[in-house]
């Protein structure tokens, strides 16, 4: 299966921006949908965004819609999550995940078989 590595996390003030990257190994990268999830201490892992297979259309959780953008560069085997207007409640470990299977309209973590190690995002107020 595909290997994923996240990078770009860090500490940022509220209202600031960060860009996360998900680097993927393996072949046929364009065949994978790439999801972003986050998990804060004491909370369940929640869906953030997904970029679909192929051309890279995307969908977002309501909590980040209009602030976050995910896109893919198939030539570089990378997916980015651009996070703008960050809020303290965005603080979490962020993960990228991959699947070659179908993804439901309501994106759930259990359809993704490959996961990165996570990168910490901390937003101060």
Image (tube, helix red, strand yellow):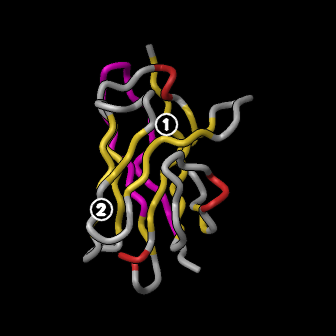
Q: Is residue 8 magenta?
A: yes
Report how far apart the C-alphas of labels 1 and 2 lie in the structure.
24 Å
Q: Decide: is 74 above or below 17.
A: below
Q: Residue at x 46, y 78 (%)?
A: 25
Tally the marks: 2
Residues at marks 1 and 2 touching, judged by CB atoms closer than 8 Å: no
Label 1 neighbourhood size at 10 Å, few (<14), some (14-19), many (20+)?
A: many
Type of secondary structure dominating the magenta stretch:
strand
Q: Is residue 42 left or right of residue 65?
A: right
Residue at image coords 57%, 52%: 118
Name the quadrant containing residue 7. Answer: bottom left
Question: Disc 1 designates what residue?
Answer: 121
Is 96 above or below relative to 102? above
Residue 80 magenta: no
Side of 41 where 8 appears, left or right: left
Q: Quadrant of residue 117?
A: bottom right
Which mark, by number, is residue 56?
Answer: 2
Residue 73 in the image, given as x and y percentages of width and height: 26, 67
């Amino acid at each position: 299966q595909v290997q994923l590595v996240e990078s770009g996390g860090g500490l940022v003030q509220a209202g600031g921006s960060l860009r996360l990257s998900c680097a993927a190994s393996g072949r046929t990268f364009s065949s994978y949908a790439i999801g972003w999830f986050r998990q804060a201490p004491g909370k369940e892992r929640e869906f953030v965004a997904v970029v679909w297979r192929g051309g890279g259309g995307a969908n977002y959780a309501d909590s980040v819609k209009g602030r976050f953008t995910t896109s893919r560069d198939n030539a570089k085997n990378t997916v980015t999550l651009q996070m703008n207007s960050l809020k303290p409640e965005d603080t979490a470990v962020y993960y990228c995940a991959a699947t070659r299977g179908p993804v439901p309209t309501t994106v759930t973590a259990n359809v993704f078989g490959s996961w990165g190690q996570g990168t910490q995002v901390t937003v101060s107020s």
